[in-house]
Image (cartoon, rainbow, N blue to C red):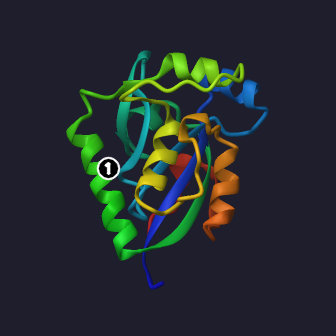
Amino acid sequence: MILGKNIYLILTHTGTTWSKIIKKLNDYKYSHVMLSLDDNFDRMYSFGRKKWYNPFIAGFVVEDKDGDFFSFYNKAKCRVYKFAVTDKQYDDLCKVLDWFEENKHRVSYDIIGVILRYIGISFRQKDRYVCTHFVGSVLKDSGIAPMINKPEELKPQDFETIANRISSKIIYEGFLRKIPRS
């Protein structure tokens, strides 16, 4: 297998009320997960707030470490994993992400699913995601992490295990806005 491209998995904790609740329920230092295909972190894909000031307007988002959300929540902490993928996996990942971008008005945030997962109930609604479900789904659907069984059940700490299983390495830990650009 020839590995030709790098992608990045970013675990974060912003300090918002919602992220504090998720952090407490998880008993884990991070509460949110994103993917980036570029080493400048200009485009990080996830499910979360569409407006930094309103947690109820949520869905598919493409975030920038220097954008509105992380400018306001500038003390967000993160851990960044880097891992190599094949050209085919990268192309398949791009196709899946393109589908989400083209259908961003069709997909939405799964508030019911996120609540039920923390009381131990597996629940899946069509076209509804939370950050962990989204990232797990795109990693599985692109063939990068085929070992993911039920993406809708993933929690932020599960990505530490996934990152280790797909031979990633931690390249940064600290404030998200200070991730070094290449």
Return the x and y of residue 143 as percentages of the image width and height. 45, 62
Q: Nearer the viewer, residue 111 or 55?
A: 111
Binning the other alpha carbons within 10 Å of mark 1 as few (below 14), some (14 to 19) or many (20 upward) gives: some
Q: Is residue 166 left or right of residue 144?
A: right
Q: Quadrant of residue 88?
A: bottom left
Residue that mark 1 sits on: 97
Q: Nearer the viewer, residue 142 or 108?
A: 142
Quick check: can you spot residue 17?
Answer: no
Residue 85 x, y percent position in the rendering = 46, 72
* Image location of residue 110, percent across then percent down: 46, 22
Q: Which of the 4 image quarters holds residue 5? A: bottom left
Q: Is label 1 in a helix, a strand or a loop?
A: helix
On-image quarter of the C terminus = bottom left
Closer-to-camera residue (175/114):
114
Q: Is residue 94 visible?
A: yes
Residue at figure coordinates x 26%, y 27% from the top left:
106
